[in-house]
Image: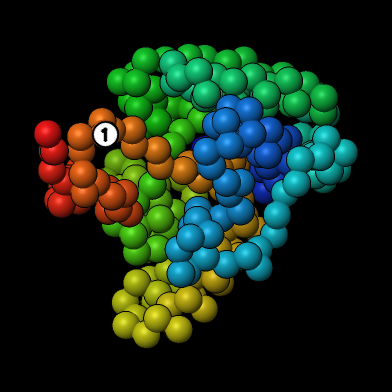
């Protein structure tokens, strides 16, 4: 997550440069041990609203430098990467820190326990930070409307990217209110395209769910609903 209202991350070319500095495939292969997929948009490829027709940011130091050269910070800058005390997130922060140095950006990594990390995230006391987010239900609106619309800026909402785009707000609102899936799919494709042009974030991956359980548990199935009762609804124990 980048704070879109704080310099230097209020500069679209800086945000695009950061996106080019993250080796997403390395994260999936080495940090997740293959249990995930590279993210192109906030909506995963398994969702009916996913669109592949978006701007992408392949890992490239040269492309990152070219974007930074177009920004108001061509000579580099200093920043702080905020992360939780999580090994995966720490490793991701280290990768970004090392790659930032290649184009003249000096970054310090600050690790905080969850309560302090979330407090900083909630209150906007960060510049760039590692985070995980998702939807409580499988409709694509849950991955876009709460997190990116200007109607949901803190302190009342969860748009912790502090991202504002009136066109995006309009498209996502129309999609949320429509009952026509074909129309919604087109609108969500447009919304994803807008996001990936503006890149208020630097997406890395969609995690594959893994739920170990004892062999005596039967009827257990994974469910896109983010509630434990759906996982356990038809589960039972055998002898």
User: Percent position (x, y) of residue 31?
Assistant: 58, 27
Q: Which residue is drawn at 41% across and 42% down?
A: 209
Residue 217: quarter of image:
top left
Q: Residue at x 20, y 34 (%)?
A: 216
Residue 79: quarter of image:
top right
Left or right for 206, reference 119 = right
Secondary element under disc 1, as helix, strand or loop, is loop
User: Percent position (x, y) of residue 73?
Assistant: 76, 34
Quadrant location, the C terminus: top left
Task: Tell me, yes or no, if residue 164 can be seen here.
Answer: no
Pick the residue in front: 134 or 109.
Answer: 134
Residue 18: quarter of image:
top right
**Display coloring:** rainbow
Pick the residue in front: 74 or 222.
Answer: 222
User: Percent position (x, y) of residue 95?
Assistant: 67, 24
Q: In this view, does 12 lie above or below 211?
A: below
- Residue that label 1 marks: 215
Q: In this view, does 126 lie above or below 41?
A: above
Q: Residue at x 51, y 30 (%)?
A: 130
Q: Residue at x 24, y 46 (%)?
A: 220
Count the numbered circles shown. 1
Left or right for 1, reference 174 = right
Left or right for 232, reference 101 = left
Q: For mark 1, does the 10 Å Cα neighbourhood hold few (<14), some (14 to 19), or many (20 or more) residues?
A: few
Task: Tell me, yes or no, if residue 117 can be seen here.
Answer: yes
Pick the residue in front: 81 or 226.
Answer: 226
User: Percent position (x, y) of residue 17?
Assistant: 74, 40
């Amino acid at each position: 997550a980048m704070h879109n209202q704080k310099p230097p991350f209020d500069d679209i070319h800086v945000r695009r440069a950061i996106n080019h500095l993250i080796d997403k495939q390395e994260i999936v292969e080495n940090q997740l041990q293959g249990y995930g997929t590279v993210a192109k948009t906030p909506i995963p490829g398994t969702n009916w609203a996913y669109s592949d027709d978006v701007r992408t940011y392949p890992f490239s130091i040269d492309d990152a430098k070219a974007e930074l050269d177009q920004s108001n910070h061509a000579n580099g800058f200093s920043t702080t990467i905020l992360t939780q005390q999580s090994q995966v997130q720490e490793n991701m922060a280290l990768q970004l820190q090392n790659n930032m140095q290649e184009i003249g950006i000096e970054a310090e990594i600050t690790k905080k326990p969850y309560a302090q990390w979330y407090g900083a995230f909630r209150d906007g006391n960060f510049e760039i930070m590692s985070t995980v987010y998702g939807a409580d239900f499988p409709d694509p609106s849950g991955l876009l409307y709460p997190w990116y619309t200007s109607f949901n800026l803190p302190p009342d909402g969860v748009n912790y990217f502090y991202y504002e785009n009136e066109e995006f707000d309009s498209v996502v609102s129309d999609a949320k209110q429509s009952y026509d899936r074909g129309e919604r799919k087109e609108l969500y494709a447009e919304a994803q395209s807008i996001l990936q042009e503006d890149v208020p974030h630097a997406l890395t991956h969609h995690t594959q769910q893994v739920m170990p359980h004892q062999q005596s548990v039967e009827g257990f199935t994974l469910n896109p609903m983010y509630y434990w009762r759906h996982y356990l609804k038809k589960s039972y124990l055998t002898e």
